Amino acid sequence: MTDLLILGASEEQLPLYQEARRRGIRTIAVDQRRDRPALRVADEFLHVTTRDAGAIIAALGDRRPAAVVSAASDAALMTWHELCAYYATPYRYPRQAAVVSLDKAAFHAMARSAGVDGHAWVRAADPADLIDAARSLRLPLIVKPNDGSGGKGVHRVDRPSELGRAFAHARAYSLDGDVIAEEYVEGRHLVVELFLRDGAAMFAAVMEKRLVPDTDFMVAGHVCPVSMPGADRLIALVVRLCAAMGLRDGPADFDVVAAADGEFRIIEAGARMGGNGIPHLLRACYGIDNVAALISLVMGEPFDIVPAPPRPSMLRLLASPLSEEGELADLAGLDAVRAMPGVAGLDVYVRPGDLVRPFTESGHKIGHLVTTGASGAETGQVMARALETLRIVVVPTPLLATQGEPDAHV
């Protein structure tokens, strides 16, 4: 019984499969889609949604996996908890951690009860109720699905007249139909990534987000490390929140804004490993492997995380240059970029002929690029050269039948 059941097979979970294969651990992938990139690495595939623990148990029949794991996705967290309990695995993912990761209002309420100051918010399932409740909030607002993730359904509202449209947009991405409106917090957008053991942080890093201009907070990438006043206080704050959500062991990921008043506002929490290529960035910056640590944790094996002195590093998400659906027509320069000094990693999840969607949510990214250097300036220079060399050509879908030459690239 050495099978590792992995919930999800997207590019975010791909590192789990690669590490399991490196160790000789047999993997069973669970996903509702058949086109996921990790399926090329998995040993077995269960075509089942990761949200339905009962269906997964039924699909496995009499077989009992040695361990269950997920990463970089909130959708499977409650299932992770339920399957750990059902199969009595060495690691038991906590239920409360799943609840507050999946429910933004529940997280805010938990943070407040733990003594962590936040920002004002309201939650509603009816547009009229949201509009009425939002009158007590200070504009601008951020409206999003209460159970959403990955930037889906998020909209900034600057005028009350925009609330109805923003509600409809957010609700289209909500499973439970609830929408949350929060006061916008001005400041530096940060991510805190940590790995706990016995309630203490074995490792913690603060990264700064780079946002796509003229979008509602779409993430273009991250830089690491971040030097800023109060970083130790911020890490202590999120460790306290992990304790409140019952998470004593494993990874956690927090979205934070360092506000102009010097305080930190915790926007969201994910009691799981961060996505958008963050494990690759941490490896380049600190020399750690939190993917390997997570697999060891769930398998009940010993592990350690010993970070090296940080090296300035940068991650850029790769995406379509188009604002409409298209087909990947050409992909060139990969080998040249990978051979560049200072390029720590380049992963592309698509192949020529694949459908490529506009970058309106993190799930539509098509790859990531990580660079490093002796300074932040050098790291940025390497990134710029790599992006100039890399050629990703996308043809708009309506033009495929009439045009033979690609018309857009990055």
Image (cartoon, grey):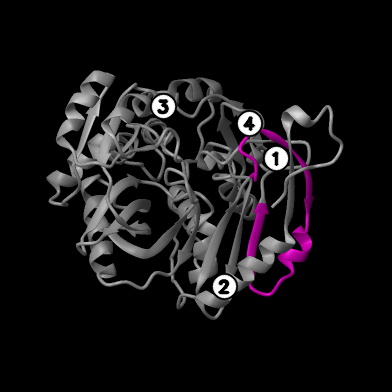
- Is residue 258 or residue 286 the one in the foreground? 258
| Residue 354 against residue 307 in the figure, above or below | above
* Amino acid type at mark 1: Arg
Q: CA distance from mark 1 to mark 2?
A: 32 Å
Q: Nearer the viewer, mark 4 or mark 1?
A: 1
Residues tagged 2 and 4 counted as in contact (Cβ below 8 A) = no
From the viewer's perspective, is the residue at label 2 or at label 4 nearer? 2
Span shown in magenta: 320-347
Q: From mark 2 to mark 4, how far is it between C-alphas?
A: 39 Å
**Are the residues tagged 4 and 3 within 8 Å (C-beta)?**
no
Q: Position of residue 326 (x, y in %)?
A: 70, 35
Inspect the image, locate mark 2, and give the three-letter code of the amino acid beneath it: Thr
Under mark 3, the amino acid is His
Q: Who comes first in sequence, dot 1 or dot 3?
A: 1
The residue under label 4 is: 45
Is residue 119 something that shows in the picture?
yes
Label at residue 169: 3
Type of the residue with mark 4: Phe
Judging from the image, what secondary structure is the residue with disc 3 in?
A: helix
Q: Earlier in the sequence, mark 1 or mark 2?
A: 1
Q: Are marks 1 and 3 in contact (CB under 8 Å)?
A: no
165 relative to 42 in the view: left or right: left
Nearer mark to the viewer, of 2 and 3: 3
Q: Residue at x 13, y 44 (%)?
A: 113
How far apart are the two marked residues, 4 and 1, measured between alpha carbons? Answer: 10 Å
What residue did someone put label 1 on? 40
